[in-house]
């Protein structure tokens, strides 16, 4: 059963994997939620951005790492338009506000570029102090119709202040609220698990730039996405009906999650796995609510209900074959398992990591067995690539681990054409 809804420039399509469930056994089923934003003309009005950059200048950032971070800060400043605001915070043992929140005038940008050039590394890594210092700057630049965006460039090796990763993540949620946070991992020793979680929980992207020379471009591209925002602070709430259980939201885990922001021309595809009990008549599975703020800063809400039908007709049940939703779910589940394997590798639990790596191949093999040749090929190719990259990561290639962590996070909501 399909429901199509259209609101402003964001299109949302909700579809259940199968139309029928068994009256005797119920079963598991995926709900696919597609979000697509219209492209905009090149001359369309861009969304003003309230940008706060947090720059790590601790001792571990010495050498080329701090120079790349300075270049990224310059790229951000140069990308700012006259309607934007910005602030820059750097940190080592303590945090300091290098540039207080200000309108992005030519004079302000020139002053910021001079201050960026003077940033030098040294000391410990007090990321919690940086979050606390950035929060008032973010509030100062906030205005209706302006997108709040935080950029964090760091190796993520917090060792002073609040250094426990779960506590740091909670602090970021508290300090930054609904702002989107994007992270940029610098160096092969950066904490990719923490930096990825920091971005994912705040609707942003985690990026690892293996070639430091590409870091300024990555910053500029991420700023451009913010300026083309169609939907930000995107939240998905899955509310199952009585006795229906949300197994997980692929790529996220819980039933209520924050999704990545959506820029003009972008698509996202989210899979929700549900377990339904036996029953008769209409199978009411879950209410799905999507809330977001549009490009004008107005709150929007889209609601849909995932439905199927119970049947005792074995012919109808047997006729339900795996389909594009099944294969898309397999892609997302593989990305999930790849991320789990990376977490176990980082935690020095190689046996559990190998089990998750094996699960990637199992998911692909099971889905490919019932798929037409083109879909089977894509599934197997993705599994082979994950296997190779996980093997390289497990053998100690840190750069592969960092890159795969960022890629798998992005691929969990990436629409695949089968």
Image: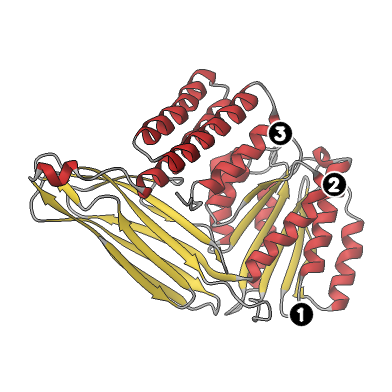
Q: Nearer the viewer, residue 370 or 52?
A: 370
Q: Residue at x 80, y 38 (%)?
A: 60
Relative to 235, is 408 above or below?
above
Splitting the image into 4 quarters, where does residue 88 fall?
bottom right
Q: Nearer the viewer, mark 1 or mark 2?
A: 1
Residue 208: image location, x then y, percent: 69, 44
Q: Do labels 1 and 3 touch, CB within 8 Å?
A: no
Front label number (1 vs 3): 3
Q: Which residue is mark 3?
A: 399
How would you rate the neighbour count of disc 3 (Cα within 10 Å): few for under 14, some for 14-19, many for 20 or more?
A: some
Mark 2: few/some/many CA within 10 Å (<14, 14-19, 20+): many
Q: Please provide percent x and percent y for residue 306.
A: 26, 58
- Residue bearing mark 1: 82
Marks 1 and 3, how far apart at CA? 38 Å
The x and y percentages for residue 381 are 53, 35
Position of 91 with respect to 1 (left or right) is right
> What is the secondary structure assignment of the residue under circle 1?
loop
Q: Tell me the residue that label 2 is attached to.
A: 66
Residue 122 sits in quarter: top right
Q: Nearer the viewer, mark 2 or mark 3?
A: 3
Viewer-side residue, 325 vs 121: 325
What's the residue at 12%, 43% (across, down)? 315
Q: Is residue 180 left or right of residue 159?
A: left
Q: Earlier in the sequence, mark 2 or mark 3?
A: 2
**Could you classify mark 1 by the number of other residues whose Cα lies within 10 Å: few (under 14), some (14-19), or many (20 or more)?**
few
């Amino acid at each position: 059963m399909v429901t199509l809804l259209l609101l402003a420039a964001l299109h949302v399509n909700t579809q259940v994997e199968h139309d029928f469930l068994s009256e005797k056994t119920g079963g598991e089923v995926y709900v696919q939620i597609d979000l697509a934003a219209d492209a905009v003309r090149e001359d369309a009005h861009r969304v003003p951005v309230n940008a706060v950059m947090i720059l790590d200048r601790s001792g571990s950032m010495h050498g080329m790492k701090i120079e790349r971070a300075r270049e990224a800060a310059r790229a951000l400043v140069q990308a700012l338009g006259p309607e934007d605001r910005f602030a820059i915070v750097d940190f080592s043992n303590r945090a300091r506000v290098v540039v207080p929140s200000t309108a992005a005038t030519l004079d302000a940008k020139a002053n910021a570029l001079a201050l960026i050039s003077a940033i030098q590394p040294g000391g410990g890594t007090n990321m919690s102090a940086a979050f606390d210092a950035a929060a008032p700057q973010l509030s100062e630049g906030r205005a209706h119709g302006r997108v709040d965006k935080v950029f964090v460039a760091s190796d993520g090796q917090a060792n002073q202040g609040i250094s426990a990763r779960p506590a740091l993540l909670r602090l970021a949620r508290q300090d930054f609220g609904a702002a989107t946070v994007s992270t940029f991992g610098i160096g092969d020793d950066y904490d990719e698990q923490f930096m990825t979680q920091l971005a994912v929980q705040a609707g942003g992207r985690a990026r690892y730039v293996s070639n430091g020379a590409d870091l300024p471009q990555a910053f500029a591209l991420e700023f451009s996405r913010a300026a083309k925002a169609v939907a930000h602070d995107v939240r998905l709430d899955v509310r199952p009906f009585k006795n229906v259980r949300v197994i997980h939201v692929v790529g996220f885990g819980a039933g209520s999650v924050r999704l990545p922001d959506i820029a003009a021309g972008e698509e996202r595809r989210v899979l929700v796995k549900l377990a339904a009990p036996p029953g008769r008549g209409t199978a009411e599975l879950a209410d799905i609510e999507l809330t977001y703020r549009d490009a004008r800063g107005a709150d929007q809400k889209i609601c849909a209900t995932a439905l199927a039908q119970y049947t005792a007709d074995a012919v109808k049940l047997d006729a339900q074959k795996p389909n594009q939703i099944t294969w898309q779910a397999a892609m997302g589940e593989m990305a999930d398992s790849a991320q789990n394997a990376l977490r176990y590798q980082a935690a020095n639990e190689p046996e559990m990591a190998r089990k998750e790596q094996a699960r990637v191949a199992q998911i692909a093999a099971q889905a490919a067995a019932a798929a037409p040749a083109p879909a089977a090929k894509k599934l197997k190719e993705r599994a082979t690539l994950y296997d190779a990259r996980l093997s390289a990561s497990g053998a100690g290639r840190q750069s592969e681990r960092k890159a795969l962590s960022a890629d798998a996070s992005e691929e969990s909501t990436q629409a695949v054409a089968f």
